[in-house]
Image: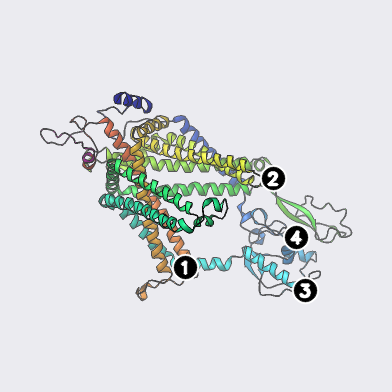
Amino acid sequence: MGGKQRDEDDEAYGKPVKYDPSFRGPIKNRSCTDVICCVLFLLFILGYIVVGIVAWLYGDPRQVLYPRNSTGAYCGMGENKDKPYLLYFNIFSCILSSNIISVAENGLQCPTPQTVITSLQRELCPSFLLPSAPALGRCFPWTNVTPPALPGITNDTTIQQGISGLIDSLNARDISVKIFEDFAQSWYWILVALGVALVLSLLFILLLRLVAGPLVLVLILGVLGVLAYGIYYCWEEYRVLQDKGASISQLGFTTNLSAYQSVQETWLAALIVLAVLEAILLLVLIFLRQRIRIAIALLKEASKAVGQMMSTMFYPLVTFVLLLICIAYWAMTALYLATSGQPQYVLWASNISSPGCEKVPINTSCNPTAQLVNSSCPGLMCVFQGYSSKGLIQRSVFNLQIYGVLGLFWTLNWVLALGQCVLAGAFASFYWAFHKPQDIPTFPLISAFIRTLRYHTGSLAFGALILTLVQIARVILEYIDHKLRGVQNPVARCIMCCFKCCLWCLEKFIKFLNRNAYIMIAIYGKNFCVSAKNAFMLLMRNIVRVVVLDKVTDLLLFFGKLLVVGGVGVLSFFFFSGRIPGLGKDFKSPHLNYYWLPIMTSILGAYVIASGFFSVFGMCVDTLFLCFLEDLERNNGSLDRPYYMSKSLLKILGKKNEAPPDNKKRKK
C-alpha cells in the first residue's frame, strides 16, 4: 500500500528528476525562450517611449513650477525674465475668494489684475501696498503687518487670519530651511549610520555559517518562552477573576473591548489558544527536527555561497538604479501629459454688474495680445483661464496615462524578475560546482546577467505581465472601494473585502511561483510555463521541507532586520539627541532644529539596506534549496552519480559519496 501511495503521489506532482550525465549546473548551450512575449514587451517599451516623446512635445511642466500673471505669461521667463515674482495687487481678493488655489493645474489664480504695465495703462493701480516676501515665486504679505482699512471690509482680524492661513498653506520656507540646515549639518553622520547598517547586514549574513544553529535555537526557545509566559499570565488573571470577576453572560455584547478584560472567560479562551499554539510548536519541533537541521545547514551553505561571491551582495544597487529610472521616467511622462494643451483666454470684468457690461460677452475667448477697447465696461480684460482639453492628444490623455501606469508596473516587475533570475544563476553555479571553490566560474554574476538578458527577456516579461495584471486589478478594486465606501451596505463591504483578500492571496502566490520559475529558468533555460510547472511540482513533492525552510528563513531574516534597523535606530537616537557622553570635542553631535529628522532618515536607510542584503540572501537560500531537492532526486552518491551537496547535508541525511579507488578527484 505504501508503494502504491507513493506512485500515486508521483503521478499527482510529477515524477522525480532523472539522472543526466551531461548536466553540470546552469545550462550554457540554450536558446531564446518566450520569443513572442519578448517581441510584445519590446513593442510595448517602444510605445512607452513614443508616449514619452509625445508628452515631451505637447506638455509644459512649467505650469506647476512657475507662477503666471493674468495673461498667462510666466514670471521670470521670456519678456518677464526680470520679473521673477508674482505680485497680487489685491491679495484680499484671493483670501476672500471661494476658489483660492488651483496649483496643480493653473497655479495660484486670483480675480484681480496682476500685470503692472497693463494695470497702469488701464488705471487699475492697487489702492494700497503691503510689505511682502517671496515664496514659491509669489509675493505674500508679512504676517506681522496690520492691513489698512478697505472699503466694505471692517474685520481686520479676518484678513489677518486669511493671510496667515494662506502663508501657512503655501509658504513652507521656514520649515524647509530648517530641514535643509539639519541635513546640511548631519548628512555625513547619516552616511556613517548607513555604513554601520551595511556592515551589520553583511556581518550577520556571513556569520550565519557559524551561528545559524544556535541562533535558530535561541529564537525558537524565545518563542516558546513567550508563549509559556503568556499561558502563565492568562492563568493568573483567570484565577484572580474566577471568584470576583464577571461572566460573559453577565456582560453581554459590547463594543468596548476593554470591558472584556474583567471577564474570566476571556482569559480562559486566551489561555487555551496559547496552550494549543505551544503544543503545536513543540510537536513540530519533535517531529520535524530533522528538517529543521536541513534548513539550518542550507542557511549555512547560503552564507558560504555569499562569502564566495561577494559581488552578489551589491547587485541590489543595480536593481535600485533600474527601478529609479523606471519610476522617474513614468513620473516625468505623467507630468508632461497632465500639462499638455494650449493656453485659453477669456474676457473678464472686475464688476460684471456695472452699467455698460451687460452686452459684453463675458467668459468668451479673446486674444491677450490684442488691445481691448470698451470704455463702457470698466475693468474689462483678457485673462488666462486654463489649458485646452481639445485636440487628439488632449482627448487621449487619460488613455495615455493608463498606458503609462501599465508600463510602470510591467517595467518594475521585469526589473525585479531580472534581479532574481540573475542571482539564481550565480548561486546555482555555486551549488553545482563539485569542487568548491575551484569549479566556481570566474565571473558567475556577470555571466548570469548576460545569459539572462540574451536568452530570457521574454520569459521574465511573461512572468512580470501576469503579476502586473493582478496588481492592476488590485489597484482598480481599491479605487472602486474608495469611491463607493460611503454608499456601501455591510453585505457589499463584505463582498468587496473578500475580493480584495482573494486578489492579495493570488498576488502572493504568483510572486512565489514566479520566483521559483526564475530559478528554474536560470538553471535549465526553459520557457516560463515549463519552468513554473517543474518548480511547482518539485516543491509539492517536498512540501514539508518547503514550509520548514521558509519559516526558519523568515524567522532569521526578521531577526536580522530587527537587529540592523533597531541597532542603527538606537545609535542614531543617542547620537543626534546628544545623549552619548564622553565623545570629546571633535565628535560633538550637530546642533539640529529637528533631531528626529536624521534619526528617521537613518532608520529608513538602514531598513532599505538590510532589505537589499537580505533579499540576496533569501534568493540564495531558495536557489540552493531547489538545487538540493534536485540533487537528491537525480543522484544517489555512487561514483557515476555523486551528490553535489555539502558534507554537513550528507551527514544530516545519513548519506555519503563513494570514494574512487585511487582517491583521485572526480573529473568532469
CA separation in Å, label 3 and label 1: 43 Å
Which residue is painted at 42% across and 51% down in the image?
271
Report the residue marked by disc 3: 149
- For badge 2, the amino acid type reads Ser
CA separation in Å, label 2 and label 3: 42 Å
| Mark seen at residue 500 | none
CA separation in Å, label 4 and label 3: 20 Å
In reply to whether residue 106 is colored magenta, the answer given is no
- Crowdedness near tag 2: few (<14), some (14–19) or many (≥20) residues, C-alpha within 10 Å: some
Residue 479: percent from left, percent from top: 60, 44
Report the residue marked by disc 1: 595
- For badge 1, the amino acid type reads Tyr
Mark in the foreground, 3 or 1: 1
Asked if residue 403 shows in the view, the reply is yes
- Crowdedness near tag 3: few (<14), some (14–19) or many (≥20) residues, C-alpha within 10 Å: few
Mark 3 element type: loop
Report the residue marked by disc 2: 389
Report the residue marked by disc 4: 111
Q: Earlier in the sequence, mark 4 or mark 1?
A: 4
The answer to the question of whether label 2 and label 3 lie on touching residues, with beta carbons closer than 8 A, is no
